[in-house]
Amino acid sequence: MKQRLISAIGATVLTAVVGVSAAPAAFAAPEPAGHVVVANDRNQAYEQLIATAIHQNSPNATPGDIERIIAAFKDIGVIISKVNPTDVGRVGNGVAQAAAAIAEFQATGNVDALRQAVCGGGNAVAGSMSILSGVVRMYEESANLPQIAEILDSIDPRTPEGGKLFDALPDFAKTPEAKAALVSLSEFGRTLNKIDKQKVILLAKDWGEAASTCDISTVIAIPGLMVRTWDLGQEIIGILLHANLGEMSAILNPRS
């Protein structure tokens, strides 16, 4: 857990401070045979840049820490490289279609332009959800990127990692209310994490697909989508009802 959390911190620091792309040369288009040495040199330079940035921000980082951070960056590069360009294009085209239709309606009052705006929005939503589905799946399959459960453990004062984090807070922040709030937040997050992300994403994508058709098939699809939405909503409500909110109010309404 500690090493994977360091990977997340290292990735954030490197992106924000150094400004290095998350997609290293190793994930660019394959180099011709005569350029293999150049590609290797670039990859080594990239890894050295990461190592330098880590040492600047975390002087106690071990070689193992650095290896894991580099591995996490490579996983991010793989995830980015596998995003379907067709989905990206669909999002862009959908946004452009919706914007043009809204502008037309504002200029002419043409009611059909509103239908085109819905179609464009549907295309954008469907494309976005398709991208999100793949990104979430590959992220969760990564052995190097910190998962939600691990992040929640890191803020839970009852765990070794969370306890160290809480102890490192300024004295004025180490109150019983703050500790209870962090426990509640971590428990609430674990509850939300039980919700099937892919089911939610797929439902949103199907709503987008229905809207994008702009014909009678949209109307035909709505009853089934509403039933699925109701069922999913009931499932989520049932999960949330079992959440241990505890002193969550301490976060939303801190005492003076």
Image (spheres, rainbow, N blue to C red):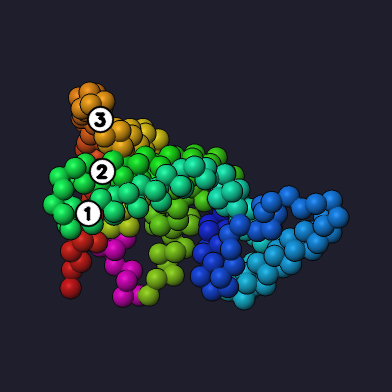
Residue 104: mark: 1
Q: Identify the amino acid type marked 3.
A: Asp
Residue drawn at x 37%, y 75% is 170
Circle 2 sits on which residue?
Answer: 116
Q: Identify the amino acid type marked 2.
A: Gln
For the C terminus, the quadrant is bottom left
How would you classify the magenta stretch by its main secondary structure? helix
Q: Nearer the viewer, residue 123 or 249?
A: 123
Mark closer to the chain start, 1 or 2? 1
Q: Are marks 3 and 1 in contact (CB under 8 Å)?
A: no
Mark closer to the chain start, 3 or 2? 2
Circle 3 sits on which residue?
Answer: 215
To which quarter of the image does residue 25 belong?
Answer: bottom right
Residue drawn at x 43%, y 39% is 130
Magenta span contains residue 9: no
In the rendered structure, the answer to whether residue 193 lies left or right of residue 176 reads right
Would residue 83 be seen by someone viewing this image from the given angle? yes
